[in-house]
Structures are given as structure tokens and as C-alpha cells.
Image (tube, rainbow, N blue to C red):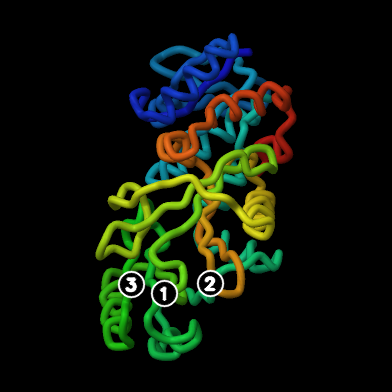
Amino acid sequence: MRIAILSRNPRLYSTRRLQEAAKAHGHEVDIIDTMHCYMDVTSANPSVRYKGKRLPRYDAVIPRIGASVSFYGTSVVRQFEMMGTYSINESVAISRSRDKLRSLQLLSRKGIGMPRTGFAHHPDKIDDLIKNVGGAPVVIKLLEGTQGIGVVLAETQKAAESIIEAFMGLNASILVQEYIKEAGGSDIRCFVVGGKVVAAMKRQAAPGEFRSNLHRGGSASLTRLSPDERKCAIDAARTMGLNCCGVDILRAANGPVVMEVNSSPGLEGIEAATGKDVAGMVIEFIEKNAAAHKTKTRGKG
């Protein structure tokens, strides 16, 4: 097979591991900087061009698209879909997962556990917004945040009101969520491939920090999932329409709750914590499922 990895940095651990795994399985692999692609949008013969040349036909693409370039990145993926190339994650599913509010609305509609959440751009009554998610402490999130950036824990009503007012002063849209105290500053990253949890790790926040992201100094360790946690992760991935994703869940008193579904999950932490060849599992899934024009939406949106 001929596989393209859409990544802005070929030196990133996840990009390198996917390249190594694909080559180990006997495939040709090209790493393509998504932001340097440009498209020939024609009805007869759509194509993607790169560095002055038309890219060849690929059997499959693996999108590794950062949150900051979601719009253009998903446009490139959609162009590949229009050309009949199989994408492990479709453009529409990536767009869904990147919109935090839309993600939560979809999960809620399917009855998947999640923290009580309020969304606001300019609420008339900030105190009522806080009250509706159970009162302080609350977690306040920017819709555009990633890797724990733009996520704040407000421990008191006054602090929450001040933070919300500050974000609104910046004309930012925010989510306000109940704080799951019993999680103890930890979450579970479930790596889902093809409707199965292939690896899972527990991430623990650094002392004095409530965000468990490894980018924020958190630590990772192997963990065993309960049947409910496994089902929760699989249902969340299916709801988003993602074949490969990371599902972050918290262990709440009433059962697992989903915090986020990540369409481009990192491999370094999960492979180190579990000792599993997750990259190889991604390539094996592509081998079994890649076929021309197999995407559900075919780039239609």
C-alpha cells in the first residue's frame, strides 16, 4: 500500500512511529505537511498538489492535524476523500471532535456519561450559569483550548464569576463544567482503534495541578479498565464517527464520564505506559479496512 501521513512535523514521536510501523509492514510512506498542500478543486479530476507537484494516488491517509489548523487540515483530508483515498478518520468526524460543544451535544444525545456542562458567550446571569452545573468549584474552558491550555479551576463562586467575566471581556466562548473532585486530579486515556480499546493509561496531575495532561507535567501509568469504562470509550468513539482516537474519561462517583474525544491522540505516552505497539495496530487496521471510496461521506460534509 501507499500511505500518506499528514503531519506538520516529521520529527514528532507519533509521526515517526507511524512511519516506522507502516514501513515495517512493507508499505510505502510519505510524510506531507498539511499546510503546504494546495488543492485543484475540479469536478472531473480533483487533486492535491504539494511543492509544485501533483501528489500521487494514495491508498490511505493518516491525518495528524493539530487543533490550530483544523479548518485547513480537514479541507485537505476532504479533498483526499473526494479523490477516493481512504482516511482512517474522516474529515467530518475530525471536525465534530474539534468542536467541544458539538462533541458534548452529540455525546449527551446518545446518553453517554459526561460532567454537567453549561455553554455561554454572553449570559445575562453568570451566577445562574454556575448554579446550573452544581455551583463552585467549577472548571472553565475555552472552546478553542488544547493540551490543557485555556482550562481553569475556579474554587469559589467569586473566583468563577471573575474568570468568566474576564473571558467574556476577550469575546471568548466558554464551557463551564462541574468539577469531578473524586477523580483526584487524574483521568484515563483510552486509545480506541476500530471500535476496540487497544490500550489505556491513567494520567495523574503533577502536585498542585488539577490538569492531568502530560504536556502540563502529568505522569502516566498502566491501568485496567472496568467494563463500563471500556464501553463508555467505545461508545464515545462511535458517536464521533472516529476509527482512531483517544477518549479521556474521569472516574466519577456515578460512573465514567467523558471529558474529550481526541482525533489525533499522541502515541508517546500511551506506548511508554503500556509497552504496546499502538502504531502497529493503527497500520493493521488500515490494512484490513482501506479501500477506494470507502469513506461514508465521500467528502460531502
Residue for badge 2: 115
Tell me which residue sits at (64%, 18%) in the image: 59
Mark 1: amino acid: His
Q: What element carries label 2?
A: loop
Q: Nearer the viewer, residue 121 or 20?
A: 20
Mark 3: give few (<14), some (14-19) or many (20+) Cα within 10 Å.
many
Asked if residue 109 is positioned above or below residue 48 in the image, the reply reads: below
- Cα separation, mark 3 vs mark 1, equals 19 Å
- Cα separation, mark 2 vs mark 1, equals 19 Å
Residue 224: x and y in percent read: 57, 50
Instruction: Name the mark on residue 182.
Output: none
Q: Is residue 174 left or right of residue 252?
A: left
Asked if residue 86 is positioned above or below residue 234 in the image, the reply reads: above
Residue 276: x and y in percent read: 53, 31
Q: In this view, does 60 lie to the left or right of 169?
A: right
Residue 42: x and y in percent read: 61, 26
Q: What element carries label 1?
A: loop
Residue for badge 3: 153
Mark 2: give few (<14), some (14-19) or many (20+) Cα within 10 Å.
some
Q: Nearer the viewer, residue 167 or 246?
A: 246
Residue for badge 1: 121
